[in-house]
Image (spheres, rainbow, N blue to C red):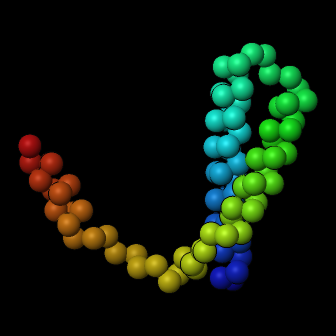
C-alpha cells in the first residue's frame, strides 16, 4: 500500500514538472516567433523525459509517516487575523 502512495506522489510530481516545463518553454519560444507543430512535439517529448529523470531523483517519503497536526504558530496567526 505504501509503494502505491509513493508512486502516485512521484507521478504527480512528474506531471507537475512536465506541465511547468512545457508552459515555460512554449511561452519562451512564442516570443521568438511562430511555434511549429514539430517544435511543439519536441518540447513535449523532452519535457516528459526531463521530468521523469528529475522525479526519480526526488526522495518521496510515505504519506503515513508525516504528522497530521497543524503547527500551533500558524493557528495563532490565523486567529489574530480574524480579530482585525
Kindly indicate the quadrant of the structure image that contains residue 69. bottom left
Name the residue nearer the viewer: 30 or 73.
30
Report the residue at 71% width, 39% height from top. Answer: 22
State the residue lying farthest toward the top: 33
Q: Looking at the picture, does residue 41 appear above or below residue 5?
A: above
Q: Looking at the image, can residue 5 be seen?
A: no
Q: Looking at the picture, does residue 56 appear above or below residue 52?
A: below
Report the residue at 67% width, 70% height from top. Answer: 57
Name the residue nearer the viewer: 1 or 77.
77
Q: Residue 83 in the image: state x and y as whole percent.
A: 9, 48
Q: Looking at the image, can residue 26 be seen?
A: yes
State the residue lying farthest toward the right: 38
Report the residue at 22% width, 63% height from top. Answer: 75
Report the number of discs: 0
Q: Is residue 5 left or right of residue 68?
A: right
Quadrant location, the C terminus = top left
Q: Residue 12 in the image: state x and y as whole percent.
A: 66, 59
Kindly indicate the quadrant of the structure image that contains residue 31. top right
Q: Is residue 53 left or right of residue 65?
A: right
State the residue lying farthest toward the left: 84
Quadrant location, the N terminus = bottom right
Report the residue at 60% width, 74% height from top. Answer: 60
Q: Residue 21 in the image: state x and y as whole percent.
A: 67, 43
State the residue lying farthest toward the front: 32
Name the residue nearer the viewer: 18 or 6.
18
Q: Looking at the picture, does residue 18 appear above or below residue 53?
A: above
Amino acid at each position: 500500500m505504501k509503494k502505491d502512495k509513493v508512486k502516485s506522489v512521484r507521478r504527480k510530481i512528474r506531471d507537475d514538472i512536465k506541465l511547468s516545463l512545457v508552459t515555460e518553454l512554449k511561452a519562451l519560444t512564442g516570443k521568438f516567433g511562430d511555434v511549429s507543430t514539430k517544435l511543439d512535439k519536441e518540447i513535449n517529448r523532452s519535457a516528459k523525459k526531463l521530468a521523469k529523470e528529475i522525479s526519480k531523483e526526488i526522495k518521496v517519503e510515505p504519506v503515513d509517516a508525516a504528522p497530521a497536526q497543524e503547527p500551533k504558530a500558524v493557528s495563532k496567526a490565523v486567529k489574530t487575523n480574524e480579530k482585525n
